[in-house]
Image: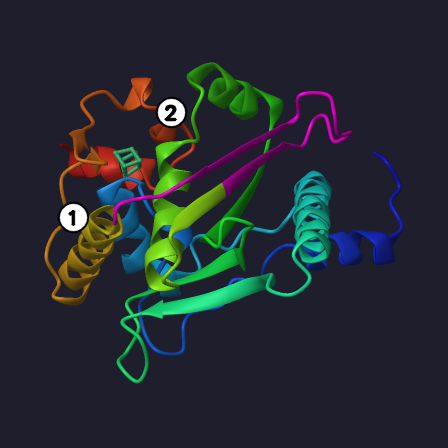
């Protein structure tokens, strides 16, 4: 076994985003936009059980470290390109305070471009496999569009700016960066906020899990659905049945 320096391991492990139960009760995060209804229900229901609290491996920590650095680099570059109006890490809550938040998010950046259009920036770092799927599709993943759409709507921007950075090839100019800017109709964000609020209500009121649905489509075969492959709630879901 590789003999890692203990301080180095602790440093890497500390880079893992800490799990912080919300002090204001159950809450959905913008990064959960567009996911499985039932997985969100289970995540909310088991938030306080510590079930998703597993120790980080060194590999995990290095992957997060690379992802965090790429995020930071991109934000720094945006700050230089738009020194007068780029703001990084803009938080939002729905509904807005003083109401108790049901959904909260953090936009990677908010800025106004040369067209005088206000954009909500969403940066995603990913493996080559996921990146190439998006290259082939010629568009961002729907989940990421939904997440950016929530920021666009909540922060009163007019367009989303989605950036994909391939973690396996970090040098620029090698086809490892994808970018899109486009407006998303506010109704799309409103529908997603309502979906999340409905699932939260279901948990709070003690109702059973919802059907297996992703973005309005019923999941009929767990083995064929990529989201089910690594779902931490698969056992629960299978026991429950369709
Ligand atoms: S196994 Fe699939 S259908 Fe079941 S909760 Fe997880 S993602 Fe949803």
- Regarding residue 33, the answer to whether it shows in the image is yes
Question: At x 56% / y 63%, what residue is drawn?
Answer: 89
For this orientation, the residue located farthest to the top is 136
- Quadrant location, the N terminus: top right
Residue 113 is one of the magenta-drawn residues: no
**Under tag 1, what secondary structure?**
loop
Q: Position of residue 233 (x, y in %)?
A: 33, 42
Q: Is mark 2 within 8 Å of ligand 1?
A: no
Please tell me how many numbered marks the rendered image carries: 2
Question: At x 16% / y 48%, what residue is drawn?
Answer: 209
Q: Is mark 1 within 8 Å of ligand 1?
A: yes
Q: Residues within 10 Å of mark 1 (few under 14, many from 20)?
A: some
Q: Position of residue 145 (x, y in %)?
A: 38, 40
Q: Residues within 10 Å of mark 2 (few under 14, many from 20)?
A: few
Q: Position of residue 43 (x, y in %)?
A: 33, 53
Question: Is residue 69 or residue 43 the one in the foreground?
Answer: 69
Placement of 91 over or under 75, stated as above or below: below
Please report the bounds of the magenta region as a residue range.
162-185
Question: Is residue 102 or residue 120 the one in the foreground?
Answer: 120
Residue 39, disc: none
* Residue at the spot of label 1: 209
Please indicate whether residue 150 sits to the left or right of residue 160 in the image.
left
* Residue at the spot of label 2: 226
Q: Position of residue 232 (x, y in %)?
A: 39, 41
């Amino acid at each position: 076994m590789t003999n890692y320096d203990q301080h180095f391991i602790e440093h890497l492990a500390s880079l893992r985003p800490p799990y912080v139960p919300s002090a204001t009760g159950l809450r959905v995060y913008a990064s959960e936009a567009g996911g499985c209804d039932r997985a969100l229900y289970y995540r909310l229901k088991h938030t306080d059980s510590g079930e998703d609290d597993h120790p980080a491996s060194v590999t995990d920590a290095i992957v997060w470290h690379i992802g965090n650095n790429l995020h930071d680099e991109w934000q720094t570059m945006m700050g230089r390109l738009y020194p007068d109006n780029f703001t990084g890490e803009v938080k939002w809550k729905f509904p807005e305070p003083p109401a108790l938040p049901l959904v909260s998010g953090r936009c990677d950046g908010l800025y106004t471009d040369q067209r005088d259009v206000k954009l909500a920036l969403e940066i995603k770092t990913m493996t080559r496999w996921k990146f190439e799927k998006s290259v082939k599709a010629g568009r961002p993943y729907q989940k990421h569009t939904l997440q950016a759409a929530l920021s666009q709507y909540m922060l009163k921007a007019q367009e989303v700016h989605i950036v994909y950075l391939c973690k396996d090839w970090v040098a620029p100019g090698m086809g490892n960066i994808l970018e899109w800017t486009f407006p998303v109709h506010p109704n799309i964000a409103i529908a997603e906020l309502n979906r999340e609020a409905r699932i939260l209500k279901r948990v709070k009121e003690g109702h059973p899990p919802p059907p297996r649905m992703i973005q309005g489509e019923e999941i009929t075969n767990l083995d064929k659905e990529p989201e089910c492959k690594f779902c931490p709630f698969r056992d629960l879901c299978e026991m429950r049945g369709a």
